[in-house]
Amino acid sequence: MEKWQKDFLELIETAVDEVERLFLGVTTTVETLFELSGEFSEHLHNTIVTEVEQYLADLNDDVDLDSYWHLDDLMDHSEISFPYSVEPTPQQHPACMGCQHYHGQVYGGNLMVCAMHPYGWDDSNCPDWEAEEFEF
C-alpha cells in the first residue's frame, strides 16, 4: 500500500473516531438532560401537589365547610320551584286565549297572567285584549 493510501485510511479512521466521540458526547448530554428534566418535573409535581394540598387545608380551616354540607338537610325542597308555563283554557282565563299580552308563567306557585292583570280578568271580555302577532 502506498503512503497516500495509508494517510487517507488514517484520516478516515480518525474522522470515524471523532464522529463516534461526538455521538457518545451527545448521547451522554441527552441522557443527562432527560434525568434532570425527570427530576425537575418530579420535584415540580411534588411541590405543586404539596402547595395545593396546603391551600385546600387552609381554605378548609378558614371556611367551615361542614355547615354547608348540612344546608341540604335544612332546606325544604318543596319550596324550591322553577318557572313553568300554563296555557289559558276556556275554563281558566278564557279572556286571555289568543292575547299577545298573556304571560302565563308560574313563579313559586303563583301564576302571572299578564302585566295589566297579574291575576287574570274576571269575565271573557278583557279590555286590554289584543290578538297575537304571528311572525313567519
Image (cartoon, grey):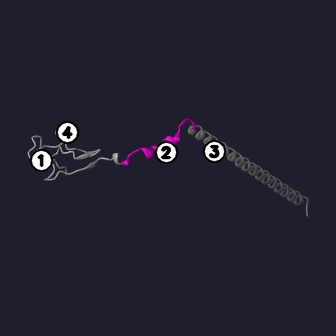
Q: Which residue is mark 1?
A: 95
The disc placed on residue 49 is: 3
- First along the sequence among labels 4 and 3: 3
Between circles 2 and 1, the one closer to the viewer is: 2
Span highlighted in magenta in the image: 61-77
Q: Which residue is mark 2?
A: 69
Q: Secondary structure at mark 2?
A: helix
The disc placed on residue 118 is: none
- First along the sequence among labels 2 and 1: 2
- First along the sequence among labels 4 and 1: 1
* Most common secondary structure along the magenta stretch: helix
Residue type beneath disc 2 = Trp
Tell me how far mark 4 sits from mark 3, CA to CA.
56 Å
Residue type beneath disc 4 = Ala
Residue type beneath disc 1 = Ala
Residue depicted at 61% across the width and 43% down the height: 53
Q: Secondary structure at mark 4?
A: loop
Q: Secondary structure at mark 3?
A: helix
Query: x and y percent of residue 22 in the render?
Result: 79, 52
Considering every residue shown, the one lying at the far bottom of the view is 1
- First along the sequence among labels 2 and 4: 2
Tell me how far mark 3 sits from mark 2, CA to CA.
25 Å
Tell me how far mark 2 sits from mark 4, CA to CA.
40 Å
- Quadrant in which residue 44 is drawn: top right
Q: Which residue is mark 4?
A: 115
